[in-house]
Amino acid sequence: MRGVTETTWLDATAQAELVRTGQASPAELVDAAIERVERVDPQLDAVIRNRFDAAREEARGELPAGPFCGVPLLLKDLGCHVAGEETNYGTSFLRDAGYRWPTDSYLAQRFRAAGFVVLGRTNVPEFGTTISTEPAAQSPARNPYDTNRSTGGSSGGSAAAVAAGLVPVAHANDGGGSIRIPAAECGLVGLKPTRARVSQGPDVGEGWAGATIDGVVTRSVRDTAAVLDVLAGPMPGDPYVAPPLARPLAGEVGAPVGRLRVGLLDVAPGEQYLDDPACRAAVEQAGRLLEELGCEVGPGMPEAMFDPQFPRFFTTTIAADVALTLSALERGALGRPIEDGDLEPRNVMYRAVGRKLSAEDYVGARMWLGRWTRRMAAFWTPRDQGGEGYDLLVTPTLAARPPELGWLTDAGPKQEGRRINSLMPFTSQFNVTGQPAISLPLHWTEEGLPIGVQLVAAFGREDVLVRVAAALEEAAPWSDRRPGVSA
């Protein structure tokens, strides 16, 4: 093999090519990645549980001849169940019980069929219900650009590991921003796919009323596109399916962008939201780049985006889901009651709210969100169909730079909720609408912290996002950026 220092910063596509051409074996790639995790992760606490022996055995055996044969991967410790292995959802009670899930998720099957070799699980906040990876059950994940700052959440461990060069790609999922926010805070590419693009079966039909979806965090647009190609596609029994794409997303990398109509939104209206000049500058820079690519760029915002009732109805669906999840774990994996003392205060609050909801409350929230989604869709609807005719919305991914550890989690549940909302006014709307959205590392603060820019396309149009993201990556490359803590 070409040596650890030469392969560390190769993306997954390049590492797979080494295997395909005989320049490296899967075992060599896996051994190199394990060495990096063992050497660097003690400074980050990104990887909370490893399966190194199993990974080495798999890498030396017969792997599926998929497009990522032999490439090392980390799975988030939330979802993506693997039969016979633990997934603890950031909790102490599942960890202490040592519960092993009985079935593979379809997602785990697709990662395996693509040839990836899983090294372990990454750090998450408890049940993924906040945007900083600081679970009470273990040490916080630390941002490799500044270890006193958050990695974001809930895919914060995955993002820290990829940003630090431990692996080229890691599993992530997103219910309100949990792919895009860690990508933004750790200088990565994070694409939230269209609703139902990736199946959540067989155990889950939909999560958070259809707001949750799985994907990955990566260091390159081509990796993001190619990995989604192998993960995407409906499975029997899925409650709904995403519109089919015209061709594989990998084929959109390098394709002409065309003259797209782009709306820029650099700050959220309202005093309750943060307003960091670096985030405004990031959107301004992205707008200039898009103009240079031939797009029609100007201010623009969906009329319904900041409807004051949205947070209440979205929170209703989350609270109901948390309450149901905890009840299911009591009946199944644990076989005992989960006491308030077992949970972080935020999830105690969610469960209490969820238990008080009536069926009318829950269905009413979903009906309101359905009507609101149609109002949002008008922004991307062609003018000849009565819409505003935009192809893209561009926003900061977050309203401020990565916060210091403790800023959210030490505030108490009510203040934590207010701070979460102040920091993330741009992401959760698109979980509810189901639209694809991507965060790109297009800007950096004076102290060297990454600032993500979010691009949002119409429902089902990941192809547009990948074409534009690849062109922006070429115009303002980030591949040479290295955090202070890295391999």
Image (spheres, grey):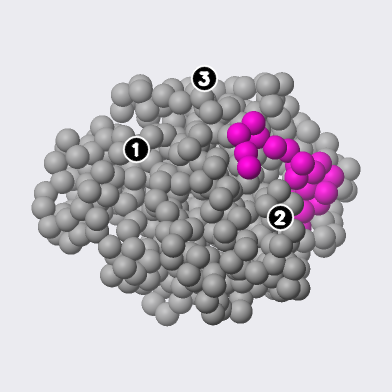
Query: Residue 271 bears which disc, if any?
Result: 3
Quadrant into which the N terminus falls: bottom right
Circle 2 or circle 3, nearest the eye:
2
Residue 173 visible in image: yes
Indicate the position of residue 342 as horizontal and vertical percent values: 19, 40
Quadrant housing residue 228 = bottom right
289 is within the stretch colored magenta = no
- Name the amino acid, label 2: Gly
Q: Name the side, left or right, on which 416 lies relative to 9.
A: left
Please report the residue visible at 54 percent of the width from the left and 23 percent of the height from the top.
274
Relative depth, front residue between 374 and 5:
5
Indicate the position of residue 417 as horizontal and vertical percent values: 37, 29
Q: Which residue is mark 2?
A: 3
Circle 2 or circle 1, nearest the eye:
2
Q: Name the side, left or right, on which 53 lies relative to 430.
A: left
Residue 231 visible in image: no
Indicate the position of residue 219 as horizontal and vertical percent values: 67, 49
Label 2 Cα neighbours within 10 Å, binned few <14 / some 14-19 / many ≥20: few
| Mark nearer the N terminus (3 vs 1) | 1
- For the residues labelled 2 and 1, the Cα–Cα distance comes to 33 Å
How many marks on residues? Answer: 3
Vertically, is 238 above or below 52? below
In the image, which residues are magenta?
Answer: 461-487
- Name the amino acid, label 3: Glu
